[in-house]
Image: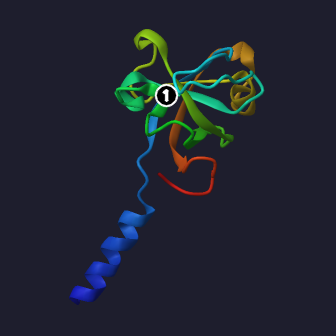
């Protein structure tokens, strides 16, 4: 295989590889988030684990604030939400997320309370079409 073909193959593989996380998804009622913004239950909000959120000195200006994630359930249902919070007190392990009720209902009924999902970076600030 030529060097050019090997390089093109490597680029294609890395371009299609987006880091996916897996864990539990729960929901919580909105208020002031770690990113310093107030949201309502109807907003598309996701809180990441402290490990996935990162440890910026000022969480209000954390690099993940305002970025989009794509959430996928084994049923094939998907939702998109913006990172505006982090799970309090270690309630979420790495890969698990806490979402607003409106996001949870796109995946499952609120009565379920907790479900397994995968999620991946799904966009830059205010743009759900770009990857991190």
Drawn side of residue 92 relative to residue 57, left or right: right
The spot of residue 89 in percent (x, y) is: 42, 9
Q: Position of residue 71 (x, y in %)?
A: 59, 39
**Label 1: element kind:** helix
Residue in the picture at 35% in, 72% down = 11
Residue visible at 23% across and 90% down in the picture: 2
State the residue in front, 63 or 51: 63
Number of labels in the image equals 1
Which residue appears farthest toward the right when viewing the image? Answer: 42
The image quarter containing residue 10 is bottom left
Decide if residue 33 is on the left or right side of residue 10: right
Q: Identify the residue under disc 1.
A: 60
Residue drawn 74% across and 22% down?
40
User: Quadrant of the image for the N terminus?
Assistant: bottom left
> Is residue 112 shown left or right of residue 59?
right
Q: Is residue 22 above or below residue 89?
A: below
Q: Against 48, is 13 above or below?
A: below
Dot 1 alpha-carbon crowd within 10 angstroms: few under 14, some 14 to 19, many 20 or more: some
Give the image quarter of residue 54.
top left
Question: Quarter-wise, where is residue 103 in the image?
Answer: top right
Residue 116, horizontal then vertical, whole percent = 54, 27
Residue 99 at x, y = what percent? Answer: 62, 25
Q: Residue at x 40, y 20 (%)?
A: 93
């Amino acid at each position: 295989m030529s060097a050019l073909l090997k390089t093109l193959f490597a680029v294609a593989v890395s371009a299609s590889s987006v880091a996916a996380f897996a864990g539990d998804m729960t929901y919580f009622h909105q208020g002031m988030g770690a990113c310093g913004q107030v949201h309502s239950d109807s907003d598309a909000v996701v809180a990441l684990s402290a490990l996935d959120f990162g440890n910026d000195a000022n969480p209000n200006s954390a690099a993940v604030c305002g970025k989009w994630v794509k959430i996928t359930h084994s049923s094939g249902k998907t939702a998109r939400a913006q990172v505006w919070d982090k799970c309090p007190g270690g309630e979420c392990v790495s890969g698990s997320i806490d979402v607003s009720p409106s996001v949870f209902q796109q995946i499952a009924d609120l009565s379920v309370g907790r479900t397994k999902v995968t999620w991946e970076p799904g966009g830059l600030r205010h743009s759900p079409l770009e990857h991190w």
